[in-house]
Image (tube, helix red, strand yellow):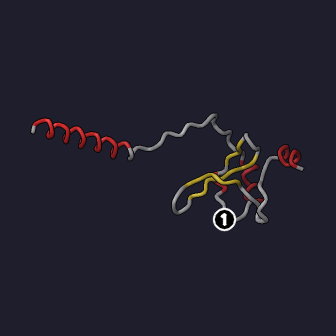
Amino acid sequence: MPQAHTTGKVTLLFAGLLVLGACTVPVVQTAEPEAAISEDVMAQLSAMAAPYQNVQTVVLRPEDGCYWYRHVGPVETTMLPLRTPEGGPICTARTAQATS
């Protein structure tokens, strides 16, 4: 009987550790910190962007040269490309010339 009691305690301890481990916040590492966007550029982005986007959270991604904003939805928070009211992405001039 003592063996079954010990096995039950170990199982309960293991289950408790799994439950607590699920409550931790995932660690997000960025490859490099994004450079701050100037006030002039922010003003231009505000004028160009569709009204439903949060331009206060905009970052410039060096991978594609486009601006992305943080969208907070009912289920998750994710980064989405900043778009004009017509639906086009807002990118730097160099990227726009390369795609033309």
Q: Tag 1's secondary structure?
A: loop
Residue 45, given in percent of the width and then of the height, sits at 75, 55
Q: Residue at x 67, y 50 (%)?
A: 58
From the viewer's perspective, tell me whether residue 8 is left or right of residue 39: left
Q: Residue at x 29, y 44 (%)?
A: 15
Type of amino acid at the residue the image marks with label 1: Tyr
**Where is residue 53, by image quadrant?**
bottom right
Q: In which quadrant of the rendered image does the N terminus lie? A: top left
From the viewer's perspective, tell me whether residue 57 is left or right of residue 3: right
**Where is residue 94, by image quadrant?**
top right
Q: Is residue 88 above or below residue 68?
A: below
Q: Residues within 10 Å of mark 1 (few under 14, many from 20)?
A: few
Residue 27, given in percent of the width and then of the height, sits at 49, 39
Q: Across the whole image, how many numbered discs are drawn on residues? A: 1
Residue 93, given in percent of the width and then of the height, sits at 84, 47
Q: Which residue is mark 1?
A: 52
Nearest the camera: 13 or 92?
13
Nearest the camera: 69 or 29?
29
Q: Residue at x 51, y 60 (%)?
A: 75
Q: Is residue 77 above or below residue 15?
A: below
From the viewer's perspective, tell me whether residue 5 is left or right of residue 41: left
Q: Residue at x 67, y 56 (%)?
A: 55
Residue 51, given in percent of the width and then of the height, sits at 69, 65
